[in-house]
Image (cartoon, helix red, strand yellow):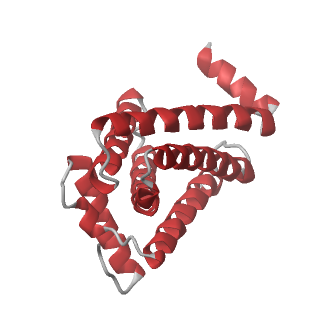
Amino acid sequence: MASTTSIIDDIRLAARGVAGLIVGDRKAAGYFDFSDRGLVTSFIAFLVVTAANAALPKLLGMESGPIFRSIAMVAILFVFQIGFTVIVLRQLKRLDGLVPYLVADNWATFFITIGSTLLALAGLTGDVAIIAIGLAVIIVEINIARLIVTLSPLQIAMLLIAQLVGVSIGLLVVGMVLPLSPAEQAALQSLAG
C-alpha cells in the first residue's frame, strides 16, 4: 500500500498503478493508497475529471448537451456499477475488496478519461481510438479484479457480468430520467442514417 504526502505524489503513484494495471504488473496494487485518505483522494480525482470532461466541450465551443446531464449520467451509471459490484462482492464474501476496487477504478477512470480527451483534442476520434480505449477499459477492469481485489477467474467473470448488467440498467434509467433533447435526437439520427 502506497503512503503519500501530497496530491502530486498520489497522482504520480496512481499513474504508475494504472500503467501497471494496463500491462498486468502484479506490483500495481503497491502504487495505490487504500487508506481512507486514498479513497477520498481517488474520489476527488474522479469528480474533477468528470466535471472537466462535462465542461470541456462547452469551453471549446463544441456542440454538446447540458453539463448537468453529462454529470448526472456519469453519477447514475457509477451508482449502478458500484451497486452491482457490492452485490457480487457481498455474495463472494469479499467486501474487503470494495475500497481497493474503488480506489483503483477511480484512478483508472481519471487517467483513461484524460487519455481519451487528449486523443479527441488531437482529432483521433475514429473507430480505432474507440476500440483502443474500450480495450484499455476492459483490460484495466479485469486487472483490477485480478490484481487489486484478487478474485479468481470465475469471480472476475461474475463481477464483470454484474457490472455490465448494472450499467445497462443505469443506461435505461438515464434514458427515462434524462431523455435526449430534440436537437440531440436529430444529431443521433443524422449519424445513424
Q: Is the C terminus in the top left, top right, bottom left or bottom right quadrant?
A: top right
Can residue 105 be seen in this snapshot? Answer: yes
> Hey, which residue is sitting farthest bottom in the picture?
5
Residue 86: x and y in percent read 53, 50
> Hey, which residue is sitting farthest top in the picture?
193
Residue 158: x and y in percent read 42, 35
Q: Is the N terminus in the top left, top right, bottom left or bottom right quadrant?
A: bottom left
- Residue 129 is drawn in which quadrant? top left
Front-most of residues 60 and 66: 66
Can residue 129 be seen in this snapshot? Answer: no
Residue 29: x and y in percent read 27, 62
Front-most of residues 86 and 63: 86
Q: Could you tell whether 170 is left or right of 114 in the image?
A: right
Q: Residue at x 31, y 41 (%)?
A: 139
Front-most of residues 15 and 181: 15
37 relative to 49, above or below = below
- Residue 137 is drawn in which quadrant? top left
